[in-house]
Amino acid sequence: MDLLLSITIGFIVVGFIVLASMKKGMESKLAFITANTEDEESSTKAKSIIWWIVSATAWGIVSMILIVWSFHDHFG
């Protein structure tokens, strides 16, 4: 197995584990926000949820790029 494929698989697996482990915390923050809409702390928790979504999207895009690059390098 070449280095690029190993990096791709490792990036995807580690990223998935991190996102899955943070999911429960994000759900509890969302529940807090929906219960306390006027609270100052809700704004901070909302920002952390937004950054979690942005980072998950970035992880997905980078994963797709690495997969395409891996296949292009392997079969091209």
Image (cartoon, helix red, strand yellow):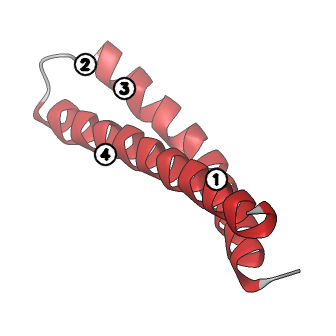
Q: Look at label 4 and name its amino acid.
A: Trp
Q: Measuring 72% from the left and 71% from the top, which residue is drawn there? A: 10
Does residue 13 appear in this view? no
Of tags 4 and 3, the one toward the viewer is 4
Q: Nearer the viewer, residue 9 or 30?
A: 9
Nearest to N terminus: mark 4 or mark 2: 2
Mark 1 surroundings: few (<14), some (14-19) or many (≥20) residues within 10 A: few
Report, in whole angstroms, how far the alpha carbon at label 1 lies from the one at label 3. Answer: 39 Å
Could you say which is closer to the camera, residue 13 or residue 35?
A: 13
Residue 44 position, x and y percent, is 19, 42
> Earlier along the polypeptide chain: callout 1 or callout 4?
4
Q: Residue furthest right?
A: 1
Q: What amino acid type should be assigned to the residue bearing mark 2?
A: Asn
Type of the residue with mark 1: Val
Q: Give the number of the disc on residue 68.
A: 1
Please state which of the two labelled residues, at mark 2 or mark 1, is closer to the viewer: 1
Secondary-structure class at tag 3: helix
Viewer-closest of 40 and 47 = 47
Residue 51: name its quadrant: top left
What's the amino acid at mark 3? Phe
Distance of label 4 from label 2 (alpha carbons) = 20 Å
- Residue 70 x, y percent position in the rendering: 70, 64
Per the rendering, the mark at residue 51 is 4
* CA gap, disc 4 and disc 3: 17 Å
Mark number for residue 36?
Answer: 2
- Labels 4 and 3 touching (C-beta < 8 A): no
Density class for disc 4 (Cα within 10 Å; few <14, some 14-19, many ≥20) is: few
Which is more N-terminal, label 1 or label 2? Answer: 2
Q: Estimate the x, y position of residue 5 in percent, counting from the top left.
A: 76, 72
